[in-house]
Amino acid sequence: MENNCANCSMRAKYDAKPTSFAGRFWRWHINFFPGWKAYFTALDPAEKQRVREAYRFKKYN
């Protein structure tokens, strides 16, 4: 199954305005969404680190 996390419109809303309702909802839902886990764990280590820093993401070490 192909995921679309890199091109997600909700993620783009977070990137544009993290404090908006849509942005906060996206950030909250990545903590348990299985598609995000699959996307994140498939990233190379350097990209994982960039994503961790950009989104203050601490899961799936």
Image (tube, rainbow, N blue to C red):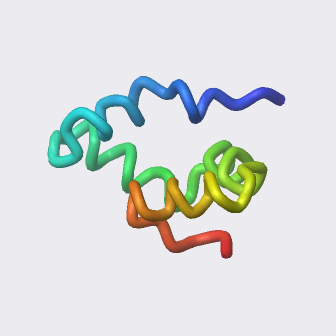
Residue 38 spot, x, y in % from top left = 74, 49
Give the residue furthest to the right.
1
Say left or right for 16 vs 48: left
Image: 9 above or below 45? above
Q: In the picture, residue 5 is in which quadrant?
A: top right
Q: In the picture, residue 10 is in which quadrant?
A: top left
Residue 36 spot, x, y in % from top left = 62, 47
Residue 47 spot, x, y in % from top left = 62, 52
> Residue at 77% across / 50% down in the picture?
42
- Give the camera-side residue of 55 and 19: 55
Residue 12 spot, x, y in % from top left = 37, 30
Image: 1 above or below 32? above
Q: Quadrant of the N terminus?
A: top right
Q: How many marks?
A: 0
- Give the camera-side residue of 8 and 45: 45
Q: Quadrant of the C terminus?
A: bottom right
Say left or right for 6 vs 61: left
- Give the camera-side residue of 21 and 55: 55
Q: In the picture, residue 23 is in which quadrant?
A: top left
Give the residue furthest to the front.
46
> Residue at 72% across / 50% down in the picture?
43
Image: 13 above or below 42? above
Say left or right for 3 vs 29: right
> Residue at 66% across / 52% down in the picture?
40
